[in-house]
Structures are given as structure tokens and as C-alpha cells.
Amino acid sequence: MQLAIVVPCYNEQEALPETSRRLLAVLERLAGEGLAARSSRLYFVDDGSRDRTWGLIEELARVDPRIHGIKLSRNRGHQNALIAGLLAAEGDLVVSVDADLQDDVDVIIEMVRRHHEGSEIVYGVREDRTSDSFFKRFTAGLYYRLLRLMGVQVVFNHADFRLMSRRAVETLREYREVNLFLRGIVPMLGFATATVRYRRRPRLAGESKYPLRKMLALAVEGVTSFSATPLRLITALGFAVCLGSFAMVVWAIGLRLFTNEALPGWASTVIPIYFLGGVQLLCIGVIGEYLAKIYLEVKARPRFTIERVIGGQEDAETGSAQIPGREPSSVAGDRNSARELSAERARTGAG
């Protein structure tokens, strides 16, 4: 079986040389044990980096024919860079892993073994979070529980370190949404799955590309892309507020008719107004988030645009030519090489 390892990269010039060395060593071990073909490949996806990441990828591809490079025209985010690599990579098996090597790449060998045992998708799952701060552990646990509460299928303590068979990748092509959250999409594919556990390591070099702001954005993406529960909670909240307001009306009327304790005051007027105003703004905000997603999906803009592909036969035959972008409608029909993509566009006149 031919294996492809896809590595999204954004400003990873410090980590890239060591990352390529370790991943190539994994490919050598797999070939030596007869678990993967010696023609297996390593795909680096440059997500619009501002440093020397692409230059290093070019140098590595010239030295080793197993290394391929995919350059996006601009930064599109980790999830889009990842799916660009998954859909472009050639191979019977595709493994995705981050460039910082916090995920234990030696586990890839165990993933391939699990596939040979019959699993189409193998998840890399962290054993524990002892290396994280208390705040990170607390928020991560809360995040996974919130997703499950909202009905989103996710694998606890799993990020984007996974193995997928060619069958699973081709099924993934059919999911065309612009708002990507692969941790939620992949479990929806079905197929036989397995998990391998590993201990997460410190970052190899550079700084984290997922600060708190991006982590919060990813959390919102996961909830709003896969669950309508927040909208249903708005309905329940509105119903509860209506009941509470009706009870207050009954209480105020009773107080006025049957007692002498009714006192004029601004509190009974101002507090309900502020409360209802806050609830309304909250509800409008949640509804607006869903409307924004509908807006983005309806426009059907490309999820990514591949500017250049290097390495192996593609580089030799096309001379690293620029490749037009892919519309969401054609993402599901993406070919596995730059040559086939160019031929298809020549036939259809697309782009």
C-alpha cells in the first residue's frame, strides 16, 4: 500500500527540517516492515506562510523525490490547508499530522497496523493532558462536553492526527461545506474506526498557531456547523421568559387588587425591560451566527486555491506550473494530481 502523509504548514521554517527527517524515517520503517510501499510520499501544504517555509519545501523536494509541496495562494486557515492536502495527496492511505511534531509520529506505524486489521479510519488520541496548563485542560474538557451535549459527534482528546483509507478520503470529497470542522465531519463518514493512544510532546520549534482567539473560533465553528441545538435553546429560553413575564403580570395584578402593598417604583418596569432586551440581543446574536454561515455557504466561494505544486512527477511534467483554484462544486471531484486537474479544466473550459 502507498501511504501519503499530509502536513499543513504555516510559518514553520524552524520545525520543517526536523519534521521532514522524522517523517521520512517513519516511511523507511514502514517500508522495511512491509507495511507500506517504498513509493510512499510526504506532502507539505504551505498555508500562505510569511517566512521561508515554501523555500524550504522546495529545497527538500529537490533533495528527496518522496517529498511533495502544495502552495496555497494565500492563508486560508488550518482546516482548509488540511483538506487541500487530503484531496490532492495520492495513496491508498492518507495520514494527517501537524508540523510541530507534538503528535508522536511513531504512532503512524501502529495506525497502519490497525488499518491492516480492518479499520478505515484510525484516530490518534491523547492519553492525558498533563503537559497542558490548568486553564487549557479545563477549557478543552468543557469544549468536548459542550459539543457532545449539542449532539456533535467528536472523538474525545482527538485533534487532526488521523489515518484515513482512500475510500474514506473519497467519501470526504462529497462534503462540500465552506465552514470546515473536520473533527466533526470525519466521524460522520461512518466506516470501521479504531484509536491509538499517545503522549503529546512539547512543540518542536516556533510558536503555537492556535492562540486563544483561534481556539474560541474553532469551538464556535464546531457547535454552529453541526448542531441546531442553540436555535432550539433560544426557543426554550423565549418560552421560559414568556412564562416568567406572565407570572409577574399575575403577581402584580394580585398585589394591586388584594393587598395594599403595591408601591410605585421604577424597578418593576426597568428590570424586566433590561432583562428582555438582553435576552433578545443574545438570541439575535446566535441567529446571526447561523445566518452568517448560510451566507458563506450560498456564495459557494472556493475553500482554497492551489498556486503551485512541486515534487515527483508533477514537478517534472508541469514545471511547477501554477494551477487554477477549485470551486466548492468541483472540490468533490478533485483529482489526485496537478496533471489530471489541468486536463479536466482544459476539457471543460473551467477557470
Image (cartoon, rainbow, N blue to C red):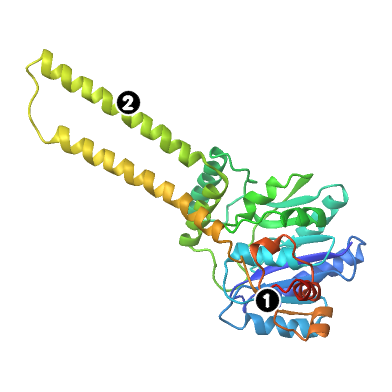
Give the residue number, with chain letter if any, for mark 2.
243
The quarter of the picture where residue 21 lies is bottom right
Q: In the image, residue 170 lies at what x, y percent?
A: 77, 56
Nearest the eye: 187 or 328 = 328
What amino acid does circle 2 point to? Leu
Q: Residue at x 77, y 46 (%)?
A: 194
Q: In front: 119, or 27? A: 119
Q: Nearer the viewer, mark 2 or mark 1?
A: 1
Task: Confirm or deny contact between disc 2 and disc 1 (CB under 8 A).
Answer: no
Q: Is 6 positioned to the left or the right of 178 in the image?
A: right
Residue 62 vertical position relative to residue 144 in the rendered view, above or below: below
Task: Answer left or right for 125 relative to 267.
Answer: right
Mark 1 is on which residue type? Pro
Residue 97 in view, yes or no: no
- Tag 2, which secondary structure? helix
Residue 263 on image: x %, y %: 7, 26
Q: Residue 208 shows which numbered tag? A: none
- Lower position in the chain sequence, tag 2 or tag 1: 2
State the residue position of label 1: 324
Q: How many marks?
A: 2
Picture coordinates of residue 85 (x, y %)?
71, 67
